[in-house]
Structure formats: C-alpha cells, structure tokens
Image (cartoon, coloured by chain):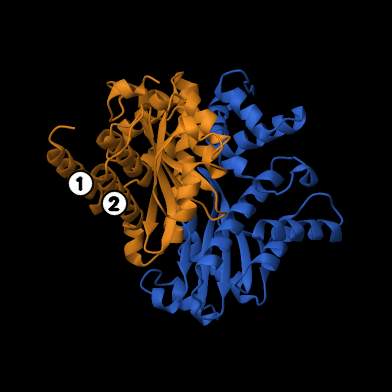
Chain colours: A blue, B orange
Amino acid sequence: MIARAFEEAIRAQLAAGTSARLSLDQLCDACAEVASLGTSIVLSAEGRIQAAIAATQSAVAVEDLQFKLGEGPGVDAYFEGRPILIGDLPAASSRWMHFVPGATALGIGAVFAYPLQLGAIRVGVLSMYANRLCIPEDGQLREMAELANLVTDAVLAMQSGVPTEELGVPLAGAADHRAVVQQAIGAIAMQLECSPRDALARLRARAFAEGVDLDDVAYGVVQGRTRFER
Amino acid sequence: MQNREAWLANTLVKLADTLIDEFDIVDFLSTLVERIAELLEAAEVGLVLVDPQGYLRVMAASTERMHLIDLFEIQASEGPCLDCYRTGEAIGSVDLEMAGDRWPAFTPMARESGFRVVHALPMRLRDQVIGAVNIFHSKPTTLGSGDLHLAQALVDVATIGLLHERAVRRGEDLAAQLQAALNSRVVIEQAKGAVAERAGVDQDTAFAWLRHYARERNLLLSTVARSVITRELPVDELRSTQVQPTREHASERRRL
C-alpha cells in the first residue's frame, strides 16, 4: 500500500539526514520513490516551487514557466481544487495556448497535477511529469491521488510544529477527514480569527500538548467544552 | 405517497435542471438524498463515496446532526454501506434487531438513534462501484420492489450527476471528479463549524444557512462555504439573509 511505502520512504529520508525535522526536499524525494509513474515531482505553493525532484531539469523549468505565464495544469489544479490529469499534453494546446508549446518544447509529454488541499486549506500542488504520452490505469490514478493526500497531511503536520516522529503511523490518518475535525477547524478559525490552516495547527498542537487524540479535542471544541484564545 | 407520478416528474425535472449549468455537487447530492427520503418515507438517508485510499466518506445526509454523521462515518469500517460497496449489490430491508452479529459496532449505534430497518443501494458506474446510499426507517418496513427500483434509479441519477459537471466535458475522468467532490464536502464541514460557532446554531441550521445564501445569490454552495471559512463572508451577513432555516423534507421525521 502506498501509505506504508511513503511512510517508510520518509523514515529513510530522516534517517539519512541530519535533522529530526523533515524538509520539503526530503518530502519530495520520498514522493519520487513511491510514485508509480512520472519522471519528476514538484511541490509548489504561492506561485513558487517549494521543492522539486526531477530526472531532468525540464520539469522544474516547466513548473517555472507555468507560474510566469500564470497558466497551466498546476495553476488550474490549485485554483479549481481538482486534479488536472493530462495524459497527452500536445492534445491540450487549446486549453493552455502558451503553456503547452513551451512545455512540449521542454520535452514534457504528460502532466498530472494534484491540488494539495484539505477543504479550504490550500497547501500547494503536487505535479508529476512524464516525457511521453501516458494514460494511467485506475490503480495508478488512485495511488497518485492517495499520494497527494499523504503529502498534504505531511506538509500540514510539518508546519504544525509537532515533531515528525510524533506524528504517528501513518502520517496521513482518516481521522483528519472526519466531520468533527473539520468542524473544529472552522470553529477555531472563528475563535482565533485566523486562517483555517493556522486553526488546524493550533488544534494539532493542543492535542499533542495534552497527549490526546485529535478527535477528542475536536469533539470538545464542537461541543463547546474547549475553547481557543488568542 | 399520493400522486407519485407527479412527484417523480417534478423530482426528475429539478435534478435534470441542475445538470445543465455549473452546479454544486454537495448541494445536488443533498437534494437527492432528501428526495429519496421523501420517496421511501424514510427516517434518514445518507450517501457515501469512496476516496482514493478506499475509505467511504460521507457526501450528503438528510440531516447534518453529528450523531448521524458519525453513524455514516463508522461505515468506513463496518456496516451496510461497506458491504454494499464491496459487493456492488443492494442490501435490502435488514432488521436491526437481528443484525448485532452482522455489524457489531454499527448496529447498536443505529438502534440508539432510533432506527429499526436499514437498506443500502450501490452507486455503480458500469463495472465500478463508487459509493453507496444508506436508508433508515424507524419502524419495521419492507420496501417493495417498485420503491427500490425507483430509489435505485434516483441513485443512478446521482452517479451520472457526478460525471456531468462541466469539467468532464473537457475529458477529465471520474477520479478527478471524485477528488474534487470529496474536497468540496470538507470545505462545507469547515464552514458548518464556523457558522455554528459564530452564530451559536446547530449543524443542521448552519448547513441550511449556507445553502440558502448560495441559492439566493446564485452561487455554488462550496464557494459560499469557502468564503465563510476564510472570513471573506461574515457569518452575520449569512444570518441576515435567512428567512427561516429549512431542509427540504418533512419535519416530522426529524424528531428522532
């Protein structure tokens, strides 16, 4: 299962590195190890590349091109909140009239761009590239989508200040999609007048500090027993 | 139900209407489960979709109250929805008084909520099962084959609706549609929490406010939800447009 492979890849990255904290570069490397297709992986957010692992420089250049032009599959994935899966990039020239010729010239044949998001929390984009036409099978599509969810959870957890080794097995939990956790994020965002992303970080930090499960704190918030102050 | 033909025609027109333009998938599926609840005179109805990790996730429910959402969510590990999803076959009229061995965790929760009978219908697209619809009754009920066929037809409409969004006409596939739909639901849960907190209302009311505002302004429900959670749209403005919070089903059934 990809979750297990991803977790092992992350642990291997941490073991080989010098810090107890996972870096985005290490995260990107771990993705490349487990991704079932694609020669390159780029993590981007706020119009910038945050981390990239590429067999060639072309994927990084293509990502750069996309942000400069303000158009492309990754841009669409980010703003529309849906995966943009282009197995045949040249065939999509009418969709991104400037991006496609540029990307094709750089040797890109296929792009699979997944928004990294948890509801209204937008973290970035995970883009996987291939240098030729590529029609993924259902299993590969599921794996890429799952990888995107795992990466989203990893990035949010990394930014919550909770030490990586404490995040638990696996890094991504079904718990994070539970209604009660999401409602708590909304409630905390109102209480603290902060972004939903910061609300999640505060929720995680409270659970870690009190040594309880995320859902327990979340239920407390939604039932009005637990409040967050600025 | 009296004059079922008229009801059905009205329902189909209403659903078809939403498929023409850009529409909100959660709003659409919520309307659908409400209509199924009406058709079958059910206590509650819920709809789950499978995520890439293979978990069943709640997309719509005839009530947004937490204990019912929990009851649908637990079916990611056990229950009629999971069985239905795995087999692709309908689960018909199971008496919960005798289902303790079959679903040891799900059954007590369902009975505690006052339910007596459960059914599940698969959401199928060609050879793929993408989710299930759960139907609860609070009295012993056996659904006739006519009722079940109609309900299955409505469920099939839901599956088609998932594919029919504008993006699909550009050739994206079911996987991308499901991902977007699942995330939409998460945005709405976040917004429900925000509205419930700020306005001091329950989850059902919070959802009704979001939906009412979206319809009044001709906006997508998920767009409104996103604006609320990012605080671009103040909850007070949401409150001021409400006349009366309503859900589109008979209020008698909510007293559980």
Where residue A82 appears, as percent x and y from the top left, is 46, 55
Mark 2 Cα shell of 10 Å, populated few (<14), some (14-19), many (≥20): some
Q: Are marks 1 and 2 in contact (CB under 8 Å)?
A: yes
Position of B83 with respect to A164 (left or right) is left
Q: Are marks 1 and 2 on the same chain?
A: yes
Q: Can you say whether A114 is above or below A95 in the image?
A: above
Nearest the viewer among B140 and B50 is B140
Question: Going 36% across and 26% down the picture, which residue do you hit?
Answer: B139
Dot 1 falls on a residue whose secondary structure is: helix
Where residue A137 appears, as percent x and y from the top left, is 51, 71
Question: Going 36% across and 60% down the picture, which residue do you hit?
Answer: B167
Position of B115 with respect to B170 (left or right) is right
The kind of residue on which mark 2 rests is Val
The kind of residue on which mark 1 rests is Leu
- Residue indicated by mark 1: B12
- Residue indicated by mark 2: B157
Mark earlier in primary sequence (1, 2)? 1
Q: CA distance from mark 1 to mark 2?
A: 9 Å
Chain at tag 1: B
Residue B43, disc: none
Q: Can you say whether B222 is above or below B201 in the image?
A: below
